[in-house]
Amino acid sequence: MSISLDEVNRIAKLARINFSDEEKQKFPSELSAILDYVGQLKKLEDQTLPTVEDPDAVNRMRTDVAEGQADPEIFLNQAPNRQGKFIKVKSVLE
């Protein structure tokens, strides 16, 4: 696919990018090469491999069961300042 200098100017205007005249002269060939490569990639056959051996396992959900909880004292003891069973923080309101 060939990109013209007018299209480069339009893209630059849409992207609000200023290019020097030197840069504008080399962009049509570079952008055309990129678009040609993308065209080659589109021709490749898309092959997807299964990610799970058991196709029925994809939508299988585990049961929602609460497991053991950590002791709150462990976390409260790590706080730099605490008041009773709460962590004390600096006030953010004046």
Image (tube, helix red, strand yellow):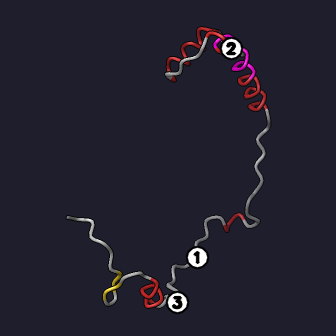
User: Is 42 on the left or on the right of 5, as rendered?
Assistant: right
The dot on residue 62 is 1
* Earlier residue among tags 2 and 3: 2
Please name the residue that numbered disc 3 is placed on. Answer: 68
Query: What is the distance, in whole Å, between disc 2 and disc 3 at their CAs?
Result: 63 Å
- View extreme (left): residue: 94
* Earlier residue among tags 3 and 1: 1
Which residue type carries mark 2?
A: Pro
**Residue at the image point whose x is 72% and y is 19% from the top:** 30
Q: Which residues are magenta?
A: 24-33
* Secondary structure under the numbered disc 2 in the rendered image: helix
Q: Nearer the viewer, mark 2 or mark 1?
A: 2
Please state which of residues 29 and 74 is positioned toward the viewer in this rendering. 74
* Earlier residue among tags 2 and 1: 2
Label 2 neighbour load within 10 Å: few <14, some 14-19, many 20+? some
Please state which of residues 47 and 19 is positioned toward the viewer in this rendering. 19
* Secondary structure under the numbered disc 3 in the rendered image: loop
Please name the residue that numbered disc 2 is placed on. Answer: 28
User: Is 69 on the left or on the right of 22, as rendered?
Assistant: left
Which residue type carries mark 1?
A: Arg
* Quarter of the C terminus within the rendering: bottom left
